[in-house]
Amino acid sequence: MDGLLLIDKPSGITSHDVVDRVRRRFKVRKVGHAGTLDPMATGLLILLVGAATRRAQEFLQCDKSYLAAVRLGKTTDTQDAEGKILTEQEVGPLTGDEIEEACRRFRGEIEQEIPAYSAVRIQGRRSYALARAGLEVPRRSRRIRIDELTILAVRLPEVELKVTCSSGTYIRALASGLGEVLGCGAHLARLRRIRVGSFTIDQAVKLDEVEPRHLLAV
């Protein structure tokens, strides 16, 4: 049993939870994912089964597209809706032009700070484990590329965006950065991944409905 599965991940579970469910359902041990989604996020998650797990790096490097809802006026320690609120303030009468001007700063190649609550390893430990333990997390950044940052709707205090970006981009860091530029703070309220490389969410199967017949050859 070899190939890949395109799963529409539901909110509230980890990417590893999805892997475990497929292992049990397919009765196969060799299953992995090609690019994690945070528990709160939904959308396209690529699973690799059997010999296909050897090609994980190919899919990890693919560009991705997301639909994101940014909540202005509140910052959290995790930069998303699951974190502890750090600051809260009223959102002024922002215009679409002002939000568009802020978005311009993030298009193209930029240096993005890696969130403290991330899976990046620091001296053998996950960054999020250090942050949860109250330990200091060294500030690190990486070069990423944002090819598309389109405003889909403005319903203050929320702004809905479509983002197409390189591998390694943190959409919650982007949300936080937009809040800083706008002067009111922000966090990521919702996130849905709609594309990975040439695969789209329209091709994905709901986790509860996935069967071996949904395996795609690679």
Image (tube, rainbow, N blue to C red):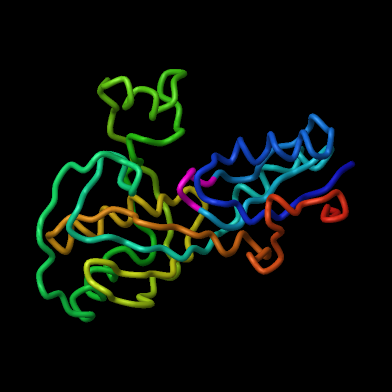
169 displayed left or right of 60: left
Q: Position of residue 5 (x, y in %)?
A: 75, 51
Q: Position of residue 148 (x, y in %)?
A: 43, 70
Magenta residues span: 37-41
Q: How many marks?
A: 0
92 displayed left or right of 29: left
Q: Quadrant of the N terminus?
A: top right
Single out the residue that lies furthest toward the front.
208
Q: Quadrant of residue 102?
A: bottom left
In the figure, 135 relative to 72: above or below?
above
Please report the residue visible at 39 percent of the width from the left and 29 percent of the height from the top: 128
Q: Nearer the viewer, residue 89 or 145?
A: 89
- The secondary structure that dominates the magenta segment is loop
Please report the residue visible at 48 percent of the width from the left and 51 percent of the height from the top: 41
Q: Quadrant of residue 97?
A: bottom left
Q: Quadrant of residue 34?
A: top right
Please report the residue visible at 63 percent of the width from the left and 61 percent of the height from the top: 197
21 displayed left or right of 134: right
Q: Position of residue 56 (x, y in %)?
A: 69, 42
In the figure, 113 relative to 209: above or below?
above
In the figure, 123 relative to 170: above or below?
above
132 displayed left or right of 216: left
Please report the residue visible at 46 percent of the width from the left and 66 percent of the height from the top: 67
Is 127 included in the stretch rendered in magenta?
A: no
Q: Position of residue 29 (x, y in %)?
A: 79, 29
Is 38 included in the stretch rendered in magenta?
A: yes
